[in-house]
Image (cartoon, helix red, strand yellow):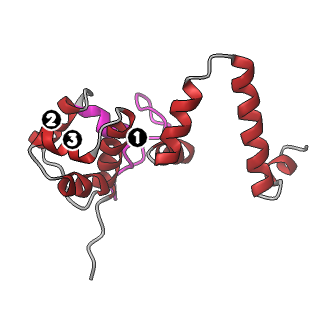
């Protein structure tokens, strides 16, 4: 029976990957900074190997973020009460998880980096409109129909 990575380990690993890619750092370069092989970094990023506390501290220093960065948007553990709607807790939604998953991909990072470089607000708005219309075409216009368009 194949062991499935813990969702929290996968989440932390995907945040490591997202930050590393945002900085333009290779797995090999991060591995060198940590005294590891790129294969070990790969296993951390996939969540197949857990990252210990001291190693997470090293990674956070190498990627110039606080350790808490890796836990932002973490899914609730199995059996843990949902915090949504409870006072004092940030509300999480399925859409924010979807956005984090998308941003963690190479395409999502590239799109976001390129989009952020566009200075003209009108051009940015036109791009958003274009992407929304393409997405509507992909799902057969279901979004447009649901919105009464």
Q: Secondary structure at mark 1?
A: loop
Which residue is identified by label 1? 73
**The quarter of the displayed image where residue 39 is located:** bottom left
- For marks 2 and 1, give the CA distance: 19 Å
Which residue is identified by label 3? 30
Instruction: Please indicate, yes or no, whether residue 87 appears anywhere in the rendered image.
Output: yes
Would you say the magenta stretch is mainly helix, strand or loop? Answer: loop
Labels 2 and 3: the sequence-earlier one = 3
Q: Secondary structure at mark 3?
A: helix
Labels 2 and 1: the sequence-earlier one = 2
**In this rendering, is residue 85 above or below 9?**
above
**In this rendering, is residue 4 above or below 120?**
below
Nearer to the camera, 83 or 135 = 135
Mark in front: 2 vs 3? 3
Mark in front: 2 vs 1? 2
Q: Please state if 108 lies on the left or on the right of 22 as rendered.
A: right
Q: Which mark is residue 101?
A: none
Is residue 50 highlighted in magenta?
A: no
Q: Start and end of the magenta stretch?
A: 67-91
**The quarter of the displayed image where residue 2 is located:** bottom left
């Amino acid at each position: 029976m194949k062991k499935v990575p813990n969702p929290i380990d996968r989440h932390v690993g995907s945040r490591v990957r997202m930050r590393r890619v945002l900085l333009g750092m290779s797995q090999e370069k991060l591995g060198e900074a940590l005294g590891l092989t790129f294969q070990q970094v790969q296993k951390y990023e996939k969540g197949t190997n857990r990252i210990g506390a001291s190693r997470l501290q090293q990674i956070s220093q190498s990627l110039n973020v606080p350790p808490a960065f890796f836990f932002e948007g973490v899914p609730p553990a199995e059996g843990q009460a949902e915090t949504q709607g409870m006072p004092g807790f940030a509300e999480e939604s399925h859409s924010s998880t979807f956005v984090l998953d998308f941003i963690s991909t190479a395409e999502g990072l590239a799109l976001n980096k390129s989009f952020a470089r566009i200075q003209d607000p009108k051009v940015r708005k036109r791009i958003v409109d274009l992407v929304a219309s393409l997405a509507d075409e992909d799902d057969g216009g279901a979004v447009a129909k649901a919105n009464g368009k």
